[in-house]
Image (tube, coloured by chain):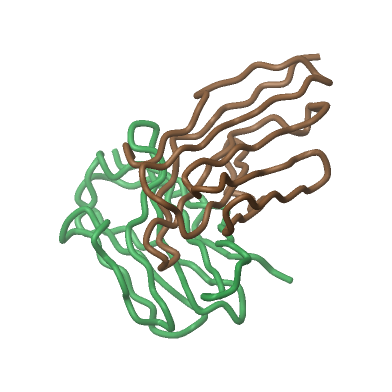
Chain colours: A green, B brown
Amino acid sequence: DAGVIQSPRHEVTEMGQEVTLRCKPISGHNSLFWYRQTMMRGLELLIYFNNNVPIDDSGMPEDRFSAKMPNASFSTLKIQPSEPRDSAVYFCASSLLGRSGGQFFGPGTRLTVL
Amino acid sequence: SQELEQSPQSLIVQEGKNLTINCTSSKTLYGLYWYKQKYGEGLIFLMMLQKGGEEKSHEKITAKLDEKKQQSSLHITASQPSHAGIYLCGADMNGNEKLTFGTGTRLTIIP
């Protein structure tokens, strides 16, 4: 079975540009999580969805960040406009709520904003 | 997060030796998750603990959750080079699958 799929794996962009990160969760999972990982702050939860509905977006840094989940098999995280301090590895994870199987992470997208 | 402390930050162990990594919460946990991460890759789920006193094992890795459900340990027996990586604990503090992660323990295995 395919795991969580993220694209692109690497993204280099210039400050001010729009960045869109994509995630396909594991089929059948009903919860989806977006995380950001940096050396300074570690792994932080940005937002999570349950049954395609955003449940908690308190970790989203500011209005420049937005996330959508139009259906059960696809989610996007958008940064507009991007800034150098947004440089990090962004992970998507999915799980089956109520089942003690843990969250399964994708390979991540390494974002560099110049 | 100050709510979750992981120690040590780094560990260098000779191949074949045992080691332990700790994760301590300031709150009673609904669940405690252990993950392993290799550089440039995503997190690999290892184990989840929910009940006080629970212990789980997978191959040479054993994880325990104390009776109070505030502290967990990850123990590796007879370490191998394949165990090298960063180990992270993730804590469910609210019963809603929203995880708070520790800062990680970087494990190096030397021959």
Q: Residue furthest front?
A: B67
Task: Identify the residue shown where x is 55% and y is 71%.
Answer: A25
- Residue pictured at 83% horizontal, 44% vertical: B59
Picture layout, residue B78 above or below residue B68: above
- Which sits in the foreground, A60 or B28? B28
- B29 and A22: which is toward the camera: B29
In the image, is A98 to the left or to the right of A16? right
How many numbered callouts? Answer: 0
Q: Is residue A89 above or below residue B84?
A: below
Q: Is residue B20 left or right of residue A108?
A: right
Q: Nearer the viewer, residue A83 or B75?
A: B75
On the image, the x and y values in percent for residue A49 come to 39, 74
Seen at 44% across and 57% down, the residue is B92
How far across and how far down the image is residue A77, in percent? Answer: 35, 64
Point out the image quarter for the N terminus of chain B. Answer: top left
Q: Position of residue B11 (x, y in %)?
A: 60, 20
Q: Position of residue A94 (x, y in %)?
A: 53, 68
Toward the left, the furthest residue is A63
Quarter of the figure with the C terminus of chain B: top right
Image quadrant assignment for residue A57: bottom left
Where residue A100 sits, quadrant-wise, is: bottom right
Q: Residue at x 47, y 60 (%)?
A: B30
Vertical position of residue B23 compared to residue B58: above or below? above
Residue A43: quadrant of the picture: top left
Can you say whether B77 is above or below A93 in the image?
A: above
